[in-house]
Image (cartoon, rainbow, N blue to C red):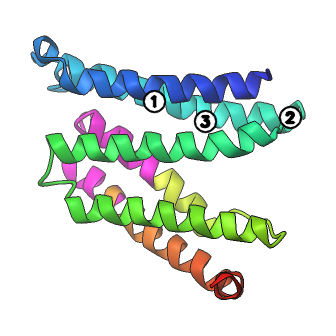
């Protein structure tokens, strides 16, 4: 097993641990750091570690020629599940900042793009990452980290603005994937 795949698997294994920390009642006491409770702090730290494994596994896979079919399959799934779990958690703890409809946009876009990619593969096409998708990913990660840590010591408006930029680029990149691949989609209907 390659190092890159081990990192991807470690990210997958962190997700259920993160979910457990959402629900452990005795750990919901505030710790005084950024007005977080222990659950939120551990969840946020695990999210950062998992996000870093995402950066690292891709870098290692490319640099050391460790790109595998397993990695191509599991890495994007792990990324999507990690982000969805973080958004759902934020929706639970800060529903005024992270509304359900915004989370649904993220989830629907992820399923739609994954479906488009699968259809493209069946037709022998590879869909390259979109610059809009890269902006979406970067702004999503920054927004999630800020919001998971109660915005650090910054005004909440900064996290909110980055969150809405992420949602905007989620829509833009989803529409971009649809338009660029409409021929493949129409051929598969």
Residue 175 location, x and y as percent? Answer: 52, 79
Front residue of 172 and 178: 178
Main SS class of the magenta portion in the image = helix
Q: Earlier in the sequence, mark 1 or mark 2?
A: 1
Q: Secondary structure at mark 2?
A: helix
Alpha-carbon neighbours of circle 1 within 10 Å: few (<14), some, or many (≥20)? some
Q: Which residues are magenta?
A: 140-162
Quadrant location of the C terminus in the rendered image: bottom right
| Separation (CA) of disc 1 from disc 2 | 22 Å
Q: Secondary structure at mark 1?
A: helix
Q: Secondary structure at mark 3?
A: helix
Q: Which residue is mark 1?
A: 48
Front residue of 105 and 143: 105
Alpha-carbon neighbours of circle 3 within 10 Å: few (<14), some, or many (≥20)? many
Q: Is residue 103 among what the camera can see?
A: yes
Measuring 56% from the left and 30% from the top, which residue is drawn there?
52
Residue 19 location, x and y as percent? Answer: 31, 28
Residue 14 location, x and y as percent? Answer: 46, 23
**Placement of 123 over or under 9, stated as above or below:** below
Q: Is residue 114 left or right of residue 184?
A: left
Quadrant location of the N terminus in the rendered image: top right
Measuring 43% from the left and 29% from the top, which residue is drawn there?
15
Front residue of 69 and 37: 69
Give the image quarter of residue 45: top left
Between disc 1 and disc 3, the foreground one is 3
Q: Which residue is mark 2?
A: 63
Measuring 61% from the left and 35% from the top, which residue is drawn there?
54
Q: Which residue is mark 3?
A: 54
Give the image quarter of residue 5: top right
């Amino acid at each position: 097993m390659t190092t890159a795949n081990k990192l991807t698997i470690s990210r997958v294994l962190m997700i259920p641990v993160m979910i457990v920390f959402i629900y452990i009642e005795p750990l919901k006491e505030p710790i005084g750091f950024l007005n977080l409770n222990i659950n939120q702090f551990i969840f946020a730290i695990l999210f950062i570690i998992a996000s870093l494994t995402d950066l690292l596994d891709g870098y290692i896979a490319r640099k050391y020629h460790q790109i595998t079919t397993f990695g191509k399959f599991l890495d994007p799934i792990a990324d999507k599940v990690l982000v969805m779990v973080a958004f759902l958690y934020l929706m639970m703890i800060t529903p005024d900042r992270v509304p359900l409809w915004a989370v649904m946009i993220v989830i629907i876009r992820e399923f739609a793009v994954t479906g488009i990619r699968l259809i493209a593969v069946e037709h022998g096409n590879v869909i390259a990452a979109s610059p809009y998708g890269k902006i979406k990913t970067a702004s999503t990660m920054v927004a999630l980290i800020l919001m998971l840590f109660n915005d650090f010591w910054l005004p909440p408006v900064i996290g909110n603005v980055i969150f809405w930029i992420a949602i905007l680029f989620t829509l833009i990149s989803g529409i971009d994937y649809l338009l660029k691949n409409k021929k493949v989609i129409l051929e598969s209907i």
